[in-house]
Image (tube, grey):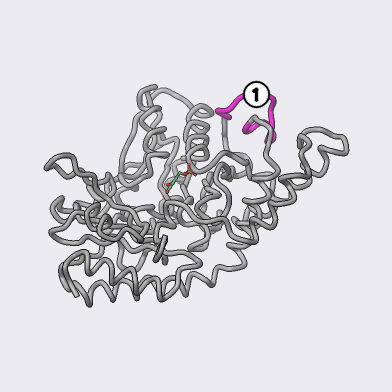
Amino acid sequence: MEHAIYLDHNASTPLAPEVQEAMRPYLELAYGNPSSSHWAGRPARAAVEQARAQVATFLGARAEEIVFTSGGTESNNAAILGTWFARERSGGRIVTSAVEHPATREPCHFLQRLGARLTVLPVDRTARVDPADLERELDRDVLLLTVMHANNEVGTIEPIAELARLARRVGAVVHTDAAQSAGKIPVDVEQLGVDLLSLAGHKLYGPKGIGALYIRRGTPFEPFVHGAGHESGRRSGTESALLAVGLGMACELARREMAVNVRIRVLRDRLWERLQEGLGKAVVLQGHPELRLPNTLNVAFRGRRGDEVLAACPGLAASTGAACHGGDTQLSDTLRAMGVDPEVGAGTVRLSLGRHTTEAEVDAAAEMLVAACGGG
Ligand SMILES: Cc1ncc(COP(=O)(O)O)c(C=O)c1O
């Protein structure tokens, strides 16, 4: 499409050329089963283990603490269900936040149906959890704390290190969903102080269909995919050397190219300035003004509907934060938890930049959006 501009990197990212390059030989070679000890299996095993080491280095973890999964959703499910089934006792409690991705929220609700008690921490206007709210909730019944590292919709970064410190005092296992933060801000399991951490390949220029779960050594964990005991008994199913190599290279690239986020932040702020110049107070920033992913700009166009704004910009790929059914506006759970006024929230558009976004694209996107909102 002419003038196609992709500002939806929080939904998914393109495969980095270096990742494609690394994966290409594995389309043909290393077709053996990584569990086979013969000549065909050995290179596949070596590739999987090298990839595991790359993921571990990226997260500041040990290779044996990394389990490959099918993506962010599975990693979150494995973390939450795996902790619950390993530690289940009557009256056990799970604490989470009101702005989690459905891949966290739904496994928590599933366990609630199985008898878990669930506490959902509120967030402030910027989508941040207040550690004092967690502190009030903590007792020895809390088995698991699961709070995302950064929010997918508004980009707000949660105070995970502080929350983890509090939760570990009462012996809770701490999980964070880092699907959105990985590659955009530093993600180090020691600095964060977490026991479990989820990654999704396709959010960091790696392939879809693969993710990883970090499981700190010694963390109680019951696998939820049972079978022949792959991944040291933590997730059965034959590993894909092809996808593992892709995720490994994506993590290595992200580690080497962290500085690119400085450029992305400058462009993101330029986009915000252009929108403000064109629309003044008719455009509102949602999410934390500073403690936010460097690529994410979530805005509400007052008096507009996000889907209509984007429909008027056919070359622009971005997301909305509200669904409209008839005359009713249904805000996303995140926007609702932030206390966003539905009238304003209806005009929500999430613009998420990436490594390849250019200044010209940012200016063109701003121009399209301003024109779509009748400004400029
Ligand atoms: C914060 C967060 N967690 C989990 C997921 C799910 O990851 P996947 O698409 O790899 O299943 C997403 C994807 O949108 C996400 O943004």
**Left or right: 334, with 354 as reference point:** left
Between 173 and 11, the one lying in front of the other is 11
Q: Quadrant of the C terminus?
A: bottom left
Task: Write down the residue under mark 1.
Answer: 227
Where in the image, quadrant-wise, is ligand 1 located? top left
Please give the range of residues in magenta. Answer: 223-235
Location of residue 30 with respect to 85 vertically, above or below: below
Q: Is residue 271 magenta?
A: no
Foreground pick, 330 / 288: 330
Tell me the residue at 25%/59% (across/down).
Answer: 312
Q: Residue at x 60, y 63 (%)?
A: 255
Q: Where is residue 326 drawn, in percent x and y?
A: 14, 40
Number of residue marks = 1
Residue furthest to the right in view is 39
x, y percentage for residue 125?
23, 57
Q: As displayed, is residue 336 above or below residue 271?
A: above
Residue 335: give x, y in percent of width and height.
Answer: 25, 50
The kind of residue tagged 1 is Gly
Q: Is mark 1 within 8 Å of ligand 1?
A: no
